[in-house]
Image: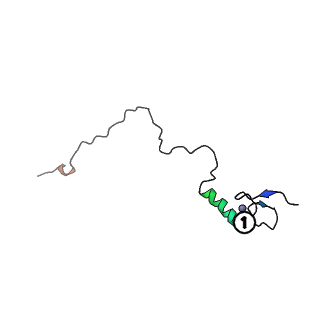
Amino acid sequence: MARPLSCPTCGRPIEWSEAFPFRPFCSERCRLIDLGAWFSGERAIPGEPLGDPDAAPETASGGSRQGREDDGEDPERGDKVN
Ligand SMILES: [Zn+2]
């Protein structure tokens, strides 16, 4: 007694038995094709698309940013005693 099954790749009817070692696929070829489809994205799981990594959240909080000002002191012109 075998359940009616069909190869997910080619739709060929198979049996859930030792006659089909690559079940639920009819053959190793169909199994590899199915795996290849997964990897190539043809069978991507439908769902929410990933967020756009480029879309950075804009921070509108305006804070007084202290500008770092250098005095511009020349280290060479230190205490030079002649
Ligand atoms: Zn097949």
State the residue in front, 51 or 44: 44
Say which residue appears at 24% left-offset and 42% top-offset. 71
Q: Quadrant of ligand 1?
A: bottom right
Q: Identify the residue under disc 1.
A: 27
Say which residue appears at 64% left-offset and 49% top-offset. 45
**Secondary element at image label 1:** loop
Q: Where is residue 82 shown, x and y percent of the image?
A: 11, 52
Question: Does residue 24 appear left or right of residue 44 in this picture?
Answer: right
State the residue in front, 79 or 21: 21
Mark 1 beta carbon near ligand 1 (under 8 Å): yes
Q: Is residue 48 magenta?
A: yes
Say which residue appears at 22% left-offset and 50% top-offset. 75
State the residue in front, 13 or 23: 13
The residue type indicated by label 1 comes to Ser
Count the marks. 1
Q: What is the span of residues highlighted in magenta in the rendered image? A: 44-52
Q: Is residue 69 magenta?
A: no
Q: Where is residue 43 shown, x and y percent of the image?
A: 64, 53
